Structures are given as C-alpha cells and as structure tokens.
Image (tube, coloured by chain):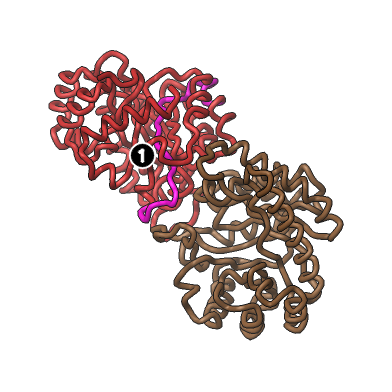
Chain colours: A brown, B red
Amino acid sequence: MTAHPRLSLNQATIKYADLATALRITREAGIASIGLWREPVAEVGLAAAEKLVADSGLRVSSLCRGGFFTAVDPEQRRAALAENRRAITEAARLAAAGAPGSVPVLVLVAGGLPDGDRDLPAARERARDAIAALVDDAAAAGVTLAIEPMNPIYAADRGVISTLGQALDVAESFPAATVGVVIDTFHVWWDPQLTEQIERAGRGGRIASYQVCDWITPLPPDALLARGMMGDGHVDFPAVTRAISVAGYTGDIEVEIFNQEIWDADPALVAEQTAKAFEAHVGA
Amino acid sequence: MTAHPRLSLNQATIKYADLATALRITREAGIASIGLWREPVAEVGLAAAEKLVADSGLRVSSLCRGGFFTAVDPEQRRAALAENRRAITEAARLAAAGAPGSVPVLVLVAGGLPDGDRDLPAARERARDAIAALVDDAAAAGVTLAIEPMNPIYAADRGVISTLGQALDVAESFPAATVGVVIDTFHVWWDPQLTEQIERAGRGGRIASYQVCDWITPLPPDALLARGMMGDGHVDFPAVTRAISVAGYTGDIEVEIFNQEIWDADPALVAEQTAKAFEAHVGA
C-alpha cells in the first residue's frame, strides 16, 4: 500500500505512539513523510531520534513546536528563547537525518495572553520581538521558522497571531528563507482574505508548511480537541489545496488532528484512515 | 439606582424573562434602554409589545434578529426574505414606540453553511444578495439593517460573515443610512485589524450598534453559550470603547450575553450585575 506521495503524518494525529512506533506505523501505512514533535523526540534523546529517523527512510516535513513567546516576565522570556534555540538545533538535525526532501522547518505557536493580561496588541508585539531575536540562530542553522496563525478560538489562551495576513506581516520583516508561515486549514478556513493571503504568501516564498484537518460541528466540549478527519467537517480542502498549489507550494502536506477519539483509536488504523481520507478529500 | 446612561440591556442576557418582565427589570435596574428580540415580542403580539414598550419609558436600541440568508433552496430563500420584511416592520414600529433616542436597527446574522455545503464564498455571496433584496424595504421603513460579523467559531453553523472588514465590504455597497454593522466585542475582539476597521466604520457612518460581552476561557462545552459578563474574560473593553468613541459612535451600548449560568440566575440580579460590570469594565 502506498499513500499519496505528498502526504505527511504529523505525530500529533497519533499522539500516544512513541517515536519508534510512529515511524513504523507511518512507513507501514505507505506514507513517505512524518511531522515530528519535540516531546517524543526528547523521550528517546536527540541522537537516538536522529538514528530512528534515518533508519525509517521517511522524510521529515516539520518539527512541532517552538514559540510561546508572550510572557512578560524577563526570566520567562529568556527561558522561552533558550528553549526555541534548542528546538532550532533539533529541527536542523532531524531534517538532516531524514530522507531526501526533508525540510528543517520549526513550527511556531505564538502563545496566548498571560494570566489577567488583556493587552492583545502588546502580546503580539512580544511574539514578533521573540522571532526577531531568533532569526540569526535560525539562519545559522539553516532552519525556517514557520509562524502558525491560529484560529481566533485560541487567541486568548494559545496563539495571539490570528490570521494568515497577520503572520505574513510578521514574517515579511525577515528573510523568506528564515521566516515563513504554516497554513493549517483548521486555523484559516474561515478567513474571507484566505485566497489573497495565500497568493501573497506564495509570491513571497513564505509557505513553509501546509497542514490539513477539518472543522467539525458541533464543536466538541474541549475546544482544543475540536479537529476532525478530512471529510468529517466543513472545510473545502480542494479549494485551499488549489490556492496553495497556484501559490507555488509543492512540499509535503501534513495531516495534524487533535481529537480524543482519534487518539484513542489504534494508531495503525488511524494512519490508514488518514491516507484514505487524504486521497478522498484533500485534492492534492 | 441609575445605571450608565448609555447602557442598554439586550433581552438575550435575561433570556427567560418575558417582554413585560424584561422591561420592568430593566427599568427597575435604572437602565434606560433595551435591546429587543423578536421571539418575546411575538409572544405578546406586535401591537401589545408596542404598548408595553411605550409604557416602559425605555429606549429601544435594536431588534434582534433578522438574517439567516444562506439557504440554497429558492423556497427557503423566499421565506427568509419574507421573514426579514416582517422583522423590518417590527424594528420600525418598536423603535417608534420607544422613548426618544430609540433607533430602528435590525440586527442581521448571516446564517451558516447549509448541510453538507462547503462553499463558504458562495454562502457569503447569498447573504450579500439577500441584503441587497431587502435594502429598499428597509429604506422605506427608515430601518437600518445592521450586519453582525460573527466570531469565526460560528462560521460553519451560524454566521458566514466573519470579520468587521468583511461586514463593511458588504455594507458599503448600500447607503449608510440603510445598511450598517454591529460591533460585538465577543465576535471581533481578536481581530488584528480591529482598530482600523472601527475607524473605517466610523468614517462611513456605519456603526449601527455596539454590543459588549466577554470572551472567557476555557470555552464552555456549548460554544454557543461561551460568553461571559464583562470582566470575567480577556476582552480589553476600554480599548474597544475608546476606538468606537473616536470613530464617532455615541449611541447605546448593549450588553448581550449568551450564558447558561446567567440565564439560570434571577433576571433582576443579572440586570443589577450587568449595570455594575458595565460601570467597572466597559470604559464608556
């Protein structure tokens, strides 16, 4: 069985599988690429993770995730930058360990408002400043920092960068090789400016990652897990995929789904389902 | 006890009170204005509602709600337009029955995607077309159709018009006296373009209503009821109120909160709490 050649399985979709299991399941489902997460990498250690990735023969399409840049406290800010520098190193090394076509892309989530803080513009400014502080390290490591605009549902508690346009406003202050954007259908599908902002991202060479998962209703009780398998919700994937193709992106397409039912299922079955849903709905 | 002179209590905040009770509670809380809903008006009939409103001495700041324009089926579309024409008449007559300063503003919610339909741009186009079909009726009745952009959390199932900028794009096709926008903090607080779009709305004379309620986290299990009393969440009300003042809006400010706990409380207490929270947090 071979899945779509551009499909990448993001580890978050099979959250409870450890790294070795995730790599094996991905390969056995005929999927050629994987999106890695820092936590399962840390569980085995970076050197062991590099070896596992190299042995798997899979491409690495991204490392999730850096970011969480919105603290006000100077000590917390320093700690966040140090953590992101470690993540940059990991992104570079894991991509180097992956099969040809792997990319050193570190996905960045801005972070939410600090407790009791209601100044959203200031939090957004701190996120921008943190990226500025990391750009030289990323460039030196050959890593692309990929800013992920998050659905406004998460603006308060997870990601203060809310639209693709806003992510591009930040990214465009820096070289395109070093700062790009992640376009995740769950986060951007509703945006009236989506097509024009995808075009803008393409023109600037800023599309570092394309991720898919569906927006389902009614929204499950835990909004953080409100994401669905492609086809189960309201997203017009072929339209988004077409816009991203027209914009010139030819890289891997990651399936990243946070959903308790999917997490509770057999990860090997999830990988197979993912490959099928990708073929049926994504339009790549 | 007298509440802030610009405060209006939207009936949705005390959802289980009938019209007579809502008017009495509002007046007894020292609140001078009320935002009405069509359902409690229909319960007593329009003529009786006019008399109740006139006797209350309260201003009417809006009528909720028209809209739901996104059906594809021609019969359903005709029915929606007919329903909205009735709502236009009601908005005009109830405002005429209210105290001086009442405004004939009909709040419009665009409606969501029809079942199984994923074409968001087409649904948005149908909403625009329906407003075009109603403009002459609204103008003849002296009513302002107020387009309410809704938080993207509702883009699939309730309101396909998602940002203030998009609402203004629609409104600006029509005369400012007849088509404006509702700015509701819950729906727009996260928008990176909020300040500039409020300025744009003010310049064009398009601000037909300003509504406040808070964005709370964690989001309650029912996302439709995820709204909080001002001060309980993340919205920077003084900043939004200031932008709206600078933009020239001097009308009533409605408190509209969909929240099961608030609905289950004694409505007279809710009205008092609302008046206090308004003073403490809204910055008007």
Which quarter of the picture shows residue B272?
A: top left
Which residue is found at the position 23% from the left and 34% from the top?
Answer: B269
Q: Position of residue B9 (x, y in %)?
A: 30, 29
Q: Up-down: is A237 above or below B271?
A: below
Q: Position of residue A71 (x, y in %)?
A: 62, 46
Mark 1 Cα-neighbour bin, 10 Å: few <14, some 14–19, many ≥20? many
Which residue is found at the position 49% from the left and 20% from the top?
Answer: B245
Residue most extreme to the front: A75
Residue A7 shows up from this direction: no
Residue A206 lies in magenta, yes or no? Answer: no
Q: Position of residue A86 (x, y in %)?
A: 75, 61
B92 vs B246, left or right, is left
Residue underneath mark 1: B67
Residue B101 shows up from this direction: yes
Quadrant of image for the N terminus of chain A: bottom right
- Nearer to the camera, A116 or B205: A116
**Numbered range of the magenta stretch:** B200-222
Residue B210 lies in magenta, yes or no? Answer: yes
Residue most extreme to the right: A140
Which residue is found at the position 31% from the left and 36% from the top?
Answer: B65
